Amino acid sequence: MLEPVIVFVFGLVVGSFCNVVIYRLPQGKSIVTPGSQCRLCGNPVRPWDNIPLLSYFLLKGQCRFCKEPISARYPTVEFISGVLYVWLYVKFGFSMSFAIYALMASTLVVVAFIDFDHKIIPNSITLPGMVIGLGLSLGIAPIAPLTSLLGLFAGGTLFYLIAVISRGGMGGGDIKLIAMIGAFLGWQGALFTIFSGALLGSLVGGTLMLLGRKGRKDKVPFGPFLSCGAILFMLAGEDLVQWYLNLLS
């Protein structure tokens, strides 16, 4: 029972770093230096005040010095990361598949929150991601190189055609994101991500319109839904596909 706890703590630590990337990358800041500091007063965050998840509650959600509220986003991202890592560990154990999918899950969490906040998906994530996905398939990834290549082109080409037909209805960031997802998860993962992401996006978008929070012309970032769809495929894609096929039979 100790191993899941260790994995959860490791996921929290990675989630803490994800928070740094989510905040700094869109601003063009270094994700390495300087160390964490309060946005308002500029005081550096002490190491004992930077313990993932725990410090937020010990500090009662505010800066030790100026009492500026700390966004609940920080412990939320950390907790999500910890849970995802444990879920992946339960499914794959300590294996290369676990390491690759954990890397992918963290990347998708970063993409989802950046796109939600800024309506952008950085090329600095997706373009290297495509190369890394293809490279891993050459030796250590759980999919073959051809499957990875087909995933990249299938997802990217489909979204590019949608962008052309809809005359801008699909952003370039989304095209590169689904291509990266395809490189890691293959063409099956890319198609599953598109289907589940579109379904989830429709449900959320429709709900927001019913509640009066969004209008028909308001744009909703698609990156978070694609990220959720890809993570869902990693965690339970095969089971969900089999369940769906059983319904049709």
Image (cartoon, grey):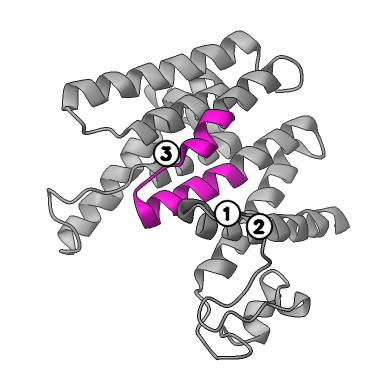
* Residue 139 screen position, x and y as percent: 76, 16
| Identity of the residue drawn at 59% across and 87% down | 60
- Distance Cα–Cα, label 2 vs label 1: 6 Å
- Distance Cα–Cα, label 3 vs label 1: 19 Å
* Residue 16 screen position, x and y as percent: 65, 61
Residue matched to label 2? 17
* Residue 140 screen position, x and y as percent: 76, 22
Residue 92 visible somewhere in the drawing: yes
Residue matched to label 1? 21
Left/right placement of residue 145 relative to residue 5 reads left
Neighbourhood count class around disc 3 (C-alpha, 10 Å): few under 14, some 14–19, many 20 upward = many
Disc 1 on helix, strand or loop?
A: helix
- Residue mark closest to the camera, 3 vs 2: 2
Q: Which mark is residue 226?
A: 3
Q: Is residue 43 magenta?
A: no
Left/right placement of residue 24 relative to residue 163 reads right
Of 64 and 112, the residue lying toward us? 64
